[in-house]
Amino acid sequence: MSFTTLISPENLANNLNQSNWFIFDARFNLADTQAGETAYRHGHIANARYVHLDRDLSSAITSFTGRHPLPNVNTLINKLGAWGVTNTSQVVIYDDASGAIAGRFWWLLRYLGHEKVAILDGGLAYWIKQGHPITTHLPNTRPVIYRPYINCSTLVNTQTLEQTLAKNSITLIDARATERYQGKVEPLDPVAGHIPKALNRPFQLNLDAQGRFLPAAVLQQQFRALIGQTPCPQVVHMCGSGVTACHNVLAMEIAGLAGSKLYAGSWSEWIRNKNRAIACDKSPKHQTLLNIK
């Protein structure tokens, strides 16, 4: 049996020693970028390797990109091979943020054509709560050659986004908190607001009180209420830097609504060009469109 969206702690525990299963710890803190790796060394799920959002799952920021540009494909492929991952490996990823960071690696592997990749539902906290152990032992690696089958249809760049929004041929969903979407606060980027025509669905709405994903039927009902009859391949997800948007992509997959896309540059790339319009909702009934000066 393979896992392509979520895996429970029980199912992971039953397969921890499978030779072709690879577990990755993706804990990360924007305010302290070394905190996740430090926490990993103090305790992690057995056989887990650590992946760093900035170092492994992103590339260097430039004057044209957002805060977390996609990693160089060849570099990522080489890292997967160095970690021992093959095209047939079952990959499991977890974090301590209910999949907010792990979802980025999940999406990247799907982009590379790797179907057998799943998020640990509830993350490390739920794993521990269910009575499963952690360890400080670091796993051994046996390098292999990883061969990707890149699926470019899952990705949208800024130019394509502008064109499709102008034609009203996509539904754009912003995964940021409502206050950021409305432009009332902006703790990370120099400009507040959102892309005109974007809808708002904070990724936290995908979760229950324990940080686990809602049932598939509930997620399907909620996303259908948001996107109507828009075909899933015409739904595009964004956030601040292309990380938590992957959570909404994953949620739609769990819901059986497959094929939505990611705008990886997201808000932090959109605002790089001062001529792109932004919207600010200063109150529920008022929206202001403006150009960044």
Image (tube, rainbow, N blue to C red):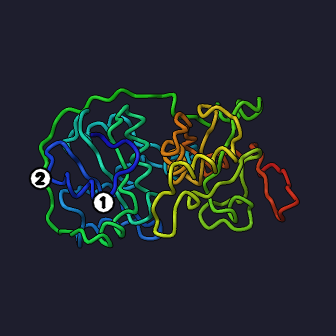
Residue at 35%, 56% in the rendered image: 120
Q: Residue at x 21, y 69 (%)?
A: 133
- Out of 44 and 224, give the one closest to the viewer: 224
- Give the SS element for disc 1: helix
- Residue 176 in picture, x, y percent from top left: 62, 58
CB atoms of marks 1 and 2 within 8 Å: no
Please tell me which residue is depicted at 69% across the width and 68% down the height of the picture: 185
Secondary structure at numbered mark 2: loop
Q: Earlier in the sequence, mark 1 or mark 2?
A: 1
Snapshot quadrant of residue 12: bottom left
Q: Is residue 98 above or below residue 291?
A: below
Q: Is residue 270 above or below residue 184?
A: above
Give the labeled residue for mark 2: 140
Residue tagged by mark 1? 9
- Left or right: residue 177 compared with residue 21: right
- Outermost residue on the right side: it is 286
Q: Closest to the observer: 8 or 247? A: 8
Q: Quadrant of residue 197?
A: top right
Look at 42% across and 35% down and name the residue there.
111
Q: Which mark is residue 77?
A: none
Q: Residues within 10 Å of mark 2 (few under 14, many from 20)?
A: few
Residue 190 placed where, x, y %? 66, 60
Mark 1, other Cα within 10 Å: few <14 / some 14–19 / many ≥20: many
Mark 1 residue type: Pro
Which label sits in the foreground, 1 or 2? 1
Q: How many marks on residues?
A: 2
Residue positioned most to the front: 217
Query: x, y (%) of residue 105?
Result: 39, 47
- Amino acid beneath label 2: Asn
Taking the image as shown, residue 184 lies to the left or right of residue 232, namely right
| Left or right of 105, for residue 227 | right
